[in-house]
Amino acid sequence: MNSSFYNGISGAKTSQFYMDVIGNNISNVNTNGFKGSTPEVSSLFSSILVGTYNSYSNGVGMGAQSFNTALDMSQGILQNTDNTFDLALGSEGWFGVQGADGNTYYTRAGSFSLDGSGNLVDGDGNYLLATLGNNIAVTNVDADTLAQFGQYYSNGTLTSVTPYAITELSDVALGTIGNQGIVNLPKILYYPPVATTQASYSANLDPTSSVGDVTLDLDTADYPTMTLDTTAKTLSLSGSVANTTAALNPQKGDIVNVILQDASGNKLSLTAELDENLAWSISDYDVNAYDLSSGFTVTSATLQTEQEIAMQKHFSMTIIGPDGDKDILDMTYTKVVPQTSTETIWNAVVNIYSFYETYDASKTYDTTQYYIDTTANKVYEIVDTQTGALTFNGDGSLASNTIPTLNNGGSALTLNLGTVGQYDGMVSNVNLDKSNSSSSNGTLEGFLTGYDVDSNGNIIASFSNGKSSSVAKIAVYHFQNDQGLTSLSSNLFSESSNSGKAFFLH
């Protein structure tokens, strides 16, 4: 009788415990990251009615008691949201958060957002813990770049924002327990430009000969001999083209043109043909109309002939300057004529141009410092100019390259035009069909476009230049005994001696 009464009381108390646990589960059915509990009960004690050594037992239970609540660690339902920092753990593990008291707590609730200071927090204001990349720092930028970040009013004064710059990281190492910190994500984040230091170009400098009429300056050693008869007022000239090495194949009948100037500045233009000895002369030309007080001076002497023309090939590509602007690497190759029987040589002039301003016809530009593109109506600053030569073997492969390193606004730029003996860069062969191609390193400046989280837990910053960088890795904590964690609220837990110390899975 007494045992029946006792069983009834303990049973009612145990049922209440069971209902309390189930009721709490039901009330938190819509709580993010909530881990339900399973109520567990046990007998208080039992009475043994038979001997210990019997082959059966007929013990009678003497009441029940609430024994334990076991966490239900089964995976919940994953849902898509519009919030970048709504996170979920697809397997075991816990997010770490730092409370207002500075202590570390653990949760499966992954709904985080940025507070007014740019810190990642949960709905209760606890800070998400992550291993920081420590690759964000306050930076100085030029006025034009700073203006793109905008300004704000502070106590009625228009103030520029504080820009932060990032150093690119592909991944943040998780590290060891205890090295995690609060994640702060600035809205004003800048990806600094990286100047081009390596550039490559590939093309065919077609060595096909082109013959045409050319006008060549006579060597000074071939300037005419003059005889002026001041009495008869006649002028005689004679000369040759023997020292004019630019004339590759002068022929009888080629035209020599000489321009003279008298003491008063009057110009006189005379022409003559080469004879079979490649000499020429003009005899007793009437100069009565000219000032003969101090004779004539030669202002120019040229030869018009037909020969192979020194062809030019022009290429250009975009590179990145140290200020983040798109600059131009400009290459002009001039074929050396005549060529040898086994090699082809092209002289090279390589320039780096940086846009300066729209062309202003009222201004005078120093052409040693500026290049004027009349077609595009633009003026470029000449950052650097280098000269050299490319020599090619008879089969068109590159034999040598003497173009030196260029100065890209303070950064050394190496121009790769191919491997000696190969066809992977510049070539020179009439039968090779090779398309032009270029490549270079360097990065344009970038402005923050947003943050995201990758599958490895890295918080990724993306930029307008197409670059991205990890800034932190979200820590996922594990315990030897998840059931031993101490529940502090519907989804917040703390470490206990029964759970064991937190650790990372690597």
Image (cartoon, rainbow, N blue to C red):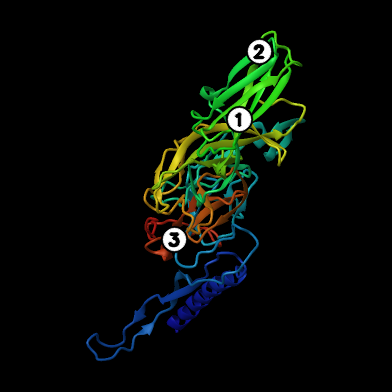
Residue type pointed to by label 3: Leu
Nearer the camera: disc 3 or disc 1: 1
Q: CA distance from mark 2 to mark 1?
A: 24 Å
Q: Nearer the viewer, mark 2 or mark 1?
A: 2
Where 104 falls versus 273 (above or below)?
below
247 left or right of 155?
A: left
Q: Position of residue 206 (x, y in %)?
A: 51, 51
Establish if 177 lies above or below 364: below
Q: Nearer the viewer, residue 140 or 197?
A: 197
Q: Which residue is mark 1?
A: 302
**Screen quadrant of the C terminus:** bottom left
Residue 366: name its quadrant.
top right
Q: Earlier in the sequence, mark 2 or mark 1?
A: 2
Q: In the image, which is nearer the foreground, mark 2 or mark 3?
A: 2
Q: Would you name the residue on which mark 3 appears?
A: 485
Cα–Cα span, label 2 and label 3: 120 Å
Is residue 194 shown above or below 203?
Answer: above
Looking at the rendered structure, the kind of residue marked 1 is Thr
**Few, some or many residues within 10 Å of mark 3 (<14, 14–19, 20+):** some
Q: Which mark is residue 229?
A: 2
Residue 370: % across, % down:
63, 30
